[in-house]
Image (cartoon, helix red, strand yellow):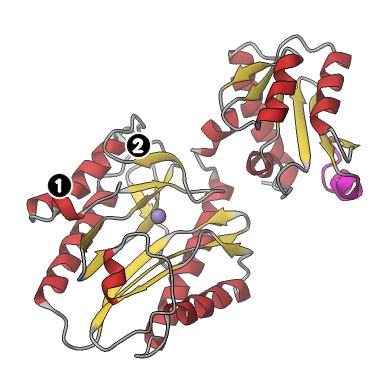
């Protein structure tokens, strides 16, 4: 599918949601939503989209105008270095639009107030809603991104020698991902050694690796706009404590059961409950202190999330992480995370080759 067709499909899907709620116009100011629709990366506050029956109008900085006109000949591009939101309001009036929506949950106070004053109405997060279900192109991007993350793990594991610091390992991994074509990390790389592995969101530090201690790494990259997310844990040295081996295998069983529970129509809550049930039955329930996982896409944390209270029901094309963990304070912890895509019959694991 070509670029124009992909953009047209997204526009058609947005228009359906708008029409259903009685809108004949919609402003989109969030740069990630803009990337979702167009596949073009604006920094925050560099563009305002006005979507209406006649098509998509893009108000953006002058410096982008020529590039955009060439790449998107079907889109109206208006150079506007300042007050893009006000220009969109003016254009909506000029076009005689009757009811224009804006995404109340993402709008900043200034632009939101301006839209309100112009009579625009609060709309649901249509783009967020659509972004939960990935199309083939998006799944392919996520597959590439997660494959790079997996290859990074395979690359770095044999290089971990006693005396190396958490920062050194993170730097080496980030370089590897960049060379593979990643534009950035999808979040701050977590490298944890020893007792640091017992902290689920440890901040990478100058701590050096010693013989016979735990290693945990949680990281990912952004490739073609899409985020990857993977966590691996292992013991560095040949004197692995029995309890570490035990919690590693319980966590691994929970990870496998979690992705095996995924299927269209299954409540995301049930995926969490399945994996959590294994850890609880093994007596470590109180040491699994976070949700099982979250949606991933253009952002590292998206809907649907799989925790104990979510109302989400899995659909084909949802991409979610399964990341059970057991953390023994002061000692060590284990987390194993895969990023998965819900298929017609189950789930496919993306964090592999
Ligand atoms: Mn994650």
Residue 340 seen from this side: yes
Task: Name the side, left or right, on which 47 lies relative to 140.
Answer: right
Q: Which is nearer the N-term, disc 1 or disc 2?
A: 2
Residue 156: x and y in percent read 43, 81
List x then y, in percent, for residue 106.
60, 33
Looking at the figure, which quarter contains the C terminus? bottom left
| Up/down of 15 relative to 245, above or below | above
Residue 216 is covered by the magenta coloring: no
**Mark 2 beta carbon near ligand 1 (under 8 Å):** no
Circle 1 residue? 277
Horizontal relation, residue 297 to residue 252: left or right? right
Question: Where ligand 1 lies, by quadrant?
Answer: bottom left
- According to the picture, the residue beneath numbered tag 2 turns out to be 264
Residue at the location (77% across, 15% down)?
118
Task: Using a 10 Å C-alpha cutoff, classify the residue at mark 2 as few (fewer than 14 neighbours), some (14 to 19) or many (20 or more).
Answer: some
Point out residue 304 in the picture as x, y percentages from the top left corner: 41, 38
- Most prominent secondary structure in the magenta stretch? helix
The magenta stretch is 63-75
**Place of residue 149 in the rendered image (x, y in percent of width and height, measured from the top left):** 47, 67
Tell me if label 1 and label 2 are in contact, CB under 8 Å: no
Question: Measured along the vertical axis of the image, is residue 133 above or below residue 206?
Answer: above
């Amino acid at each position: 599918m070509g670029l124009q067709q992909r953009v047209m499909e997204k526009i058609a899907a947005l228009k359906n949601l708008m029409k259903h709620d009685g809108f004949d116009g919609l402003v989109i100011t969030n740069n990630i939503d803009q990337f979702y629709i167009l596949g073009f990366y604006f920094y925050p506050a560099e563009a305002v989209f006005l979507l209406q029956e006649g098509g998509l109008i893009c108000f953006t900085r002058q410096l982008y105008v020529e590039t955009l006109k060439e790449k998107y000949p079907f889109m109206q591009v208006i150079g506007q270095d300042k007050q893009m939101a006000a220009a969109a309001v003016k254009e909506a009036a000029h076009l005689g639009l009757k009811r224009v929506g804006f995404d109340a949950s993402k709008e900043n106070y200034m632009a939101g107030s301006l839209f309100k004053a112009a009579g625009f109405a609060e709309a649901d997060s249509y783009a967020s809603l659509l972004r939960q279900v990935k199309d083939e192109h998006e799944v392919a991007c996520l597959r590439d991104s997660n494959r790079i993350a997996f290859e990074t793990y395979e690359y770095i594991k044999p290089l971990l020698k006693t005396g190396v610091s958490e920062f050194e390992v993170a730097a080496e991994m980030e370089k590897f991902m960049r060379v593979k074509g990643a534009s950035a990390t999808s979040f701050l790389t977590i490298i944890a050694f020893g007792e640091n592995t017992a902290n689920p969101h440890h901040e990478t530090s100058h701590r050096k690796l010693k013989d016979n201690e735990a290693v945990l790494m949680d990281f990912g990259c952004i490739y073609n706009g899409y985020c990857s997310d993977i966590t691996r844990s292992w013991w560095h040295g040949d004197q692995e404590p029995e309890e570490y081996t035990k919690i590693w295998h319980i966590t691994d069983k929970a990870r496998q059961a979690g992705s095996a529970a995924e299927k269209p129509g299954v409540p995301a809550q049930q995926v969490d409950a399945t994996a959590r049930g294994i850890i609880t039955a093994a007596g470590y329930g109180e040491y699994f202190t976070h949700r099982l996982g979250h949606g991933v896409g253009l952002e590292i944390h998206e809907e649907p999330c799989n925790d104990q209270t979510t109302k989400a029901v899995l659909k084909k094309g949802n991409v979610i992480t399964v990341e059970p963990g057991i953390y023994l304070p002061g000692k060590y912890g284990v987390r194993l995370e895969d990023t998965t895509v819900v298929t017609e019959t189950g789930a496919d694991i993306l964090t592999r080759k």
